[in-house]
Image (spheres, rainbow, N blue to C red):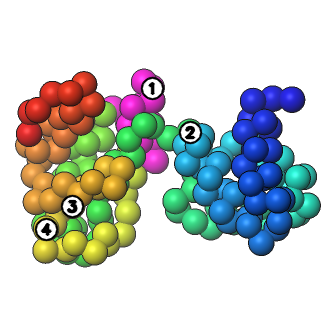
Amino acid sequence: MSEIQTTVDSIVDQYQADPTGLLSVLQDIQAKMNYLPQEALERVSERMKVPMPRVAGLATFYSAFSLKPRGRRVINVCMGTACHVRGAPLILDTLERKLGIGIDETTSDGEFTLLKVGCLGACALGPIVEVNGEIFGQMTVTKADKLPDKLLKEDRGGTEK
Ligand code: FES
C-alpha cells in the first residue's frame, strides 16, 4: 500500500468511512498533504463508497482545495474592488516577478504558492495580501517586493519587520 493510501485510510477511519463526512475527510487530507493528489481522491472514493465524480466534484468546487501541490506558504493577493483600485494588480505583478512564478503556481523550492482571491473582508486595510491566515495590509510595491524574504527570515527566527 502506498504512503498516500495509508494516510487516506487513517483519516477515513476517523470518520468510520461515513459518506456524510466526505467534506471533512477532504479537508483533513488537504491539511495533512497540502493538496489533494489524484490517488488520494481515488482512495477516498473506494473506501467511502462515494462515486469518483462526486469526490472530484467536491474537490474542485471549493477553492480551499488544491489538486496541485502547494507551497508551504500560500500568498493570496486580494483582487476585490477596494484592493484593486488601490493598486492590487501592481502588488500581484511585483510578487510574480519576485517569486518568478505566475498565478496558481508554486516556486520550485516549494516555499510559495501565489494565488489571487476575492475580497478578504478587510477592505479598509487594502491593498491586502494574506499568507497562511496572516493579513498584511496597506501593501505597497516596496513591501510586496520584500515580503517573501521577510517571511523566510521570520521562519528562521529573525525579527525583521
Ligand atoms: S477588496 Fe480586498 S479586502 Fe475587500
- x 19%, y 74%: residue: 123
Q: Does the residue labelled 3 lie within 8 Å of ligand 1?
A: yes
Q: Does the residue labelled 4 lie within 8 Å of ligand 1?
A: yes
Label 2: how many Cα within 10 Å (few below 14, some 14–19, many 20+) = some
Q: Could you say where residue 79 lies in the image, as x and y percent from the top left?
A: 30, 65
Is residue 57 found left or right of 148 in the rendered image? Answer: right
Q: How far apart are marks 4 and 2 (CA)?
A: 30 Å
* N-terminal-most mark, 2 or 1: 2
Label 1: how many Cα within 10 Å (few below 14, some 14–19, many 20+) = few
* N-terminal-most mark, 4 or 2: 2
Residue type, label 4: Leu
- Judging depth in this view, the residue of 20 and 102 nearest the camera is 20
Q: Mark 3 — residue?
A: 128
- Judging depth in this view, the residue of 112 and 94 nearest the camera is 112
Q: How far apart are marks 3 and 4 (CA)?
A: 6 Å
Magenta-drawn stretch contains 105: yes
SS at circle 1: loop
Q: How far apart are marks 3 and 2 (CA)?
A: 24 Å
For the residues carrying marks 2 and 1, which lies nearer the camera in this image? Answer: 2
* N-terminal-most mark, 3 or 2: 2
Label 3: how many Cα within 10 Å (few below 14, some 14–19, many 20+) = many
* N-terminal-most mark, 1 or 3: 1
